[in-house]
Image (spheres, rainbow, N blue to C red):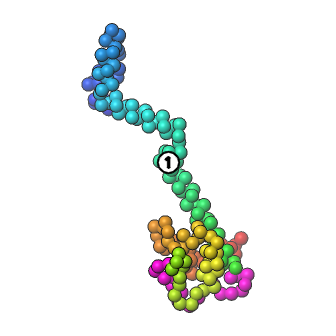
């Protein structure tokens, strides 16, 4: 689009009606070389592509990523709840004694120092068959190390949610 302040300098095809048809080729070639024509052509091509292929729109890409994150987080929370329910069904305590995850995984597996809690042991069993949870707990793709859903506070919140249902 040509800003209103620049419209006076645009000439035929934009600001002035074209009536000299015998000069059509000459004026058309001159018009196609102008910067505002090139910008308008790029804008129209981008608009056409956004209508024809909406999956390439930034809004669609962001929305799809948000939905993927929601599905992934639901999956992870469900596995964490599964480990909690396993401990509940076996009537065993969730929390261990001074358990801390090691800074580096060994052979792609989670390692903990101290006495491993029943909850983390149950998660270890689930991780063996769940790549999404394994990658999550290893911190792959995480921007925040605090979002692993394994703290005692989160365990207690999940227990409260399960109890209400």
- Report the span colored magenta: 87-105
Question: Tag 1: Cα neighbours inside 10 Å, few (<14), some, or many (≥20)?
Answer: few
**Residue placed furthest toward the right:** 89
Say which residue label 1 marks: 59
Q: Position of residue 41 (x, y in %)?
A: 39, 31
32 horizontally vs 48: left or right: left
- Would residue 15 be seen by someone viewing this image from the given angle? no
Q: Quadrant of the N terminus?
A: top left
Residue that appears at 48% across and 37% down:
49
Magenta segment includes 96? yes
Tell me the quarter of the picture where residue 90 sits. Answer: bottom right
The secondary element bearing badge 1 is classed as helix
For the residue pair 98 and 30, the one nearer the viewer reads as 30
User: Going 70% across and 79% down the picture, which residue do you hit?
Assistant: 86
Residue 93 falls left or right of residue 113: right
* Relative to 19, 157 lies left or right: right
The quarter of the picture where the C terminus appears is bottom right
Coordinates of residue 87 in the picture (x, y in percent): 68, 82
């Amino acid at each position: 689009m040509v800003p209103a302040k620049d419209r006076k300098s645009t000439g035929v095809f934009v600001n002035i009606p074209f009536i000299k048809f015998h000069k059509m080729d000459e004026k058309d070639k001159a018009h196609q070389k102008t910067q505002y024509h090139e910008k308008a052509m790029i804008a129209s091509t981008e608009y056409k592509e956004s209508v024809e292929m909406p999956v390439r729109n930034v809004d669609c890409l962001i929305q799809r990523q948000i939905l993927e994150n929601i599905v992934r987080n639901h999956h992870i929370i469900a596995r964490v709840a599964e480990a909690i329910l396993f401990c509940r069904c076996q009537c065993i305590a969730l929390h261990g004694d001074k358990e801390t995850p090691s800074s580096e995984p060994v052979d792609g597996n989670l390692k903990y120092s101290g006495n491993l809690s029943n909850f983390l042991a149950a998660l270890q069993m689930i991780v063996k068959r769940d790549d999404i949870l394994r990658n999550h707990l290893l911190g792959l793709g995480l921007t925040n190390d605090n979002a692993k859903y394994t703290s005692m506070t989160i365990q207690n919140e999940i227990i409260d949610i399960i109890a209400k249902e």
